[in-house]
Amino acid sequence: METTTLSTKGQIILPKNIREARAWRPGMEFTVEETPEGVLLRPARPFPETTLDEVVGCLKTKRKRPVSLKEMDDAITKAVKERHDRGRY
C-alpha cells in the first residue's frame, strides 16, 4: 500500500506507479466523491452522456461501403493485441 501527504494547498501527489498504470497525465480532470469507505477519485468524463440517436451518423467516412461487424471486431482485436504488446494492458 502506498502513502502520500496532503500539502498546505490541499494537494495530494498520487504515486507514480498508480498514475502510470492508469495512464493518468498532468492536466486530467477528476471527480471526487465522498463515500462511506472514504474518498473516491475518478477521471471526469470528457463529454456529456448522449444517446445513440443523438450521435448516429455524425462521423463521415471516405469508404465506398460500410464495414461489417466482423471487420470491426477484427480491427479491435488487432489494436488490443498491439497495445498489449507495447505493455499498455
Image (spheres, helix red, strand yellow):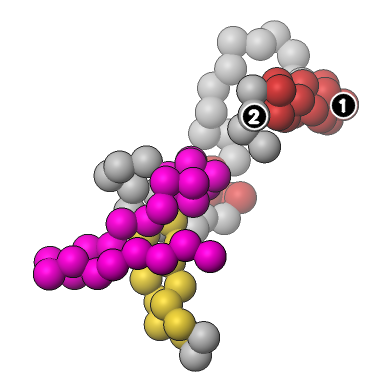
Label 1, residues with CA under 10 Å away: few <14, some 14-19, many ≥20:
few
- Binning the other alpha carbons within 10 Å of mark 2 as few (below 14), some (14 to 19) or many (20 upward) gives few
Secondary structure under badge 1? helix
Judged by its main secondary structure, the magenta piece is loop
Location of residue 87 in the rendering, given as x and y in whole percent from the top left corner: 64, 29
Displayed quadrant of residue 12: bottom left
Residue 11, image x, y percentages: 22, 63
Could you say which quadrant of the image residue 38 lies in?
bottom left
Q: Given the image, on which type of amino acid does mark 2 rest?
A: Gly
Work out which residue is located at the far right of the displayed protein and give it. Answer: 70
Q: Is residue 43 above or below residue 84?
A: below
Does the CB distance between marks 2 and 1 fall below 8 Å?
no
In percent of width and height, residue 31 lies at 37, 65
> Can residue 67 be seen in the rendering of this structure?
yes
The residue lying toward the viewer, choosing from 66 and 73, is 73
Amino acid type assigned to the residue bearing label 1 in the image: Lys
- Whether residue 68 is visible to the viewer of this picture, yes or no, is no
Q: Is residue 65 left or right of residue 47?
A: right
Camera-side mark, 2 or 1: 2
Q: Which residue is denoted by mark 1 in the rendering?
A: 70
